[in-house]
């Protein structure tokens, strides 16, 4: 283990990563006890927007949780004071999933979509059909300085069969818990689905099972700039959970999912050839070990007509540790370009790195926004991957 830590340290220094970090959200500061669930996007003007859950009272997923944002004008070296976007008093607003529509001719500077979830009970209780998780959307037409009123899109992207939410809605599939992606959504930039906005998601179906097999990953999407939405088919691996997706070539896409059952400590990769409506295949990827945690995936370039894909996650199979970026030059079939980002020392007992989100800064550089120090920090690092 000591040799591995030394090797990772040398590699981090060689990449110039250790010195290139900025603290963005810090526990106990700016009105919140804990910040979690980072998401980040770049804007057409080069600015960066970082989103997170601001948990007022502590680390609990449920309770007084606000949706917060910061802005960087200088590529991530400095960040604005915190701005609260959504505050439902003592209830939660979380899982920020931002994306920029760069293809609307009426708004050449881009339109930001921000999807998020609310809930009125704890996760297990909602799996017991005692409560509901809703899906909301807000937009910004001025690069995130002002936002529209929240729009509830739950019945378009979810299949709730909860009598407290809608007594007249009868759904034979009986979806219960629900979450859109933790991390960014994406927009198809080319091919037959150009302009489509796609949001990875997951749901539980029926009563809770001890092995978490009531969960399955899916996605939802819009082809008309948020006027209406459709739901994809579910990934046919029970226990597939938190997911995030990216565009491949020729209308194809890839989705990376957490395996909640934990009996296989690897990411699930699912591939679609119809813009994320159905899945051609889904399997465990042994080159992407995972401790049952979230991950990020991003289209960062092109080589010989194929998308170059970056994937980040805590790459330790036992604990949330060893945050790593891996690059695929063959659209997710192999992941042999490895970039270590952060890790805990052998003497540390608490998990060091957990959730992360990737953003493209330029043709050679990535940014990564991630949780560190037992969820007491969300930091931003600049990574040279070429």
Image (cartoon, rainbow, N blue to C red):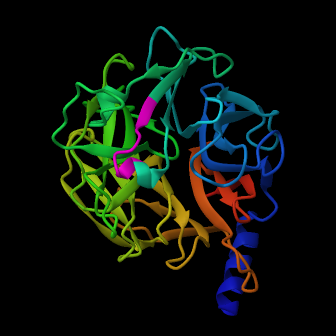
Left or right? Give the position of 159 relative to 105. Answer: left
Above or below, 379 against 9 in this view is: above
**Number of marks:** 0
Q: Residue at x 42, y 33 (%)?
A: 134
| Viewport quadrant of the C terminus | bottom right
Residue at horizontal 82 percent and vertical 33 percent from the top: 81
The location of residue 39, given as percent across then percent down, is: 59, 43
The image quadrant where one finds the N terminus is bottom right
Q: Which contiguous range is marked in magenta?
A: 126-135
Quadrant housing residue 79: top right
Camera-nearest residue between 212 and 304: 212
Image x and y of residue 97, in percent: 51, 38
Image vertical order of residue 347 relative to residue 249, above or below: below
Q: Nearer the viewer, residue 16 or 318?
A: 318
Residue 291 visible in the snapshot: yes
Q: Quadrant of residue 133?
A: top left
User: Residue 225: horizontal and vertical position, in percent?
Assistant: 38, 19
7 relative to 252, above or below: below
Frontmost residue, 303 versus 373? 373
Q: Residue at x 58, y 17 (%)?
A: 109
**Is residue 130 shown in magenta?**
yes
Residue lying farthest left?
172
Q: Is residue 235 magenta?
A: no
For residue 101, say whether it is visible: no
Of 240 and 340, nearer the camera is 240
264 left or right, relative to 42: left
Residue 28, x across and y down, in percent: 82, 49
């Amino acid at each position: 283990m000591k040799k591995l830590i030394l090797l990772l340290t040398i590699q981090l220094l060689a990449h110039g990563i250790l010195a290139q970090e900025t603290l963005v959200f810090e526990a106990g500061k700016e009105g919140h006890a804990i910040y979690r669930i980072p998401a980040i996007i770049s804007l057409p003007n080069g600015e960066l927007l970082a989103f997170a859950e601001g948990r007022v009272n502590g680390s609990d997923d449920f309770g007084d949780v606000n949706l917060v944002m910061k802005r960087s004008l200088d590529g991530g070296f400095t960040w604005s004071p915190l701005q609260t976007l959504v505050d439902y008093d003592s209830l939660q607003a979380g899982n920020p999933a931002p994306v920029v529509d760069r293809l609307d001719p009426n708004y050449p500077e881009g339109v930001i979509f921000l999807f998020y979830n609310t809930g009125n009970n704890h996760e297990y209780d909602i799996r017991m059909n005692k409560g509901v998780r809703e899906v909301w959307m807000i937009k910004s037409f001025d690069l995130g300085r002002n936002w529209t009123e929240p729009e509830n899109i739950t019945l378009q992207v979810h299949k709730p069969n909860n009598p407290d939410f809608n007594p007249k809605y009868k759904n034979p599939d009986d979806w219960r818990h629900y979450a859109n992606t933790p991390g960014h959504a994406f927009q198809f930039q080319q091919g037959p689905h150009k302009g489509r906005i796609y949001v990875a998601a997951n749901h539980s179906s029926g009563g809770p099972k001890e092995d978490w097999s009531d969960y399955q990953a899916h996605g939802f999407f819009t082809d008309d700039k948020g006027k209406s939405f459709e739901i994809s088919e579910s990934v046919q691996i029970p226990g597939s959970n938190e997911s995030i997706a990216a565009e491949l070539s020729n209308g194809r896409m890839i989705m990376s999912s957490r395996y909640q059952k934990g009996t296989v400590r690897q990411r699930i990769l699912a591939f679609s050839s119809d813009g994320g409506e159905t899945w051609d295949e889904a399997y465990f990827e042994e080159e992407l070990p995972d401790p049952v945690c979230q991950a990020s995936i991003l289209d960062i370039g092109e080589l010989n007509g194929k998308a170059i894909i970056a994937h980040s996650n805590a790459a330790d199979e036992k604990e949330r540790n060893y945050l790593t970026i891996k690059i695929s030059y063959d659209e997710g079939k192999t992941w042999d370009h490895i970039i270590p980002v952060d890790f805990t020392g052998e003497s540390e007992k608490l998990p060091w790195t957990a959730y992360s989100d990737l953003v493209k800064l330029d043709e050679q550089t990535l940014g990564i926004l991630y949780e560190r120090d037992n969820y007491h920090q969300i930091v931003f690092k600049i990574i040279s991957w070429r």
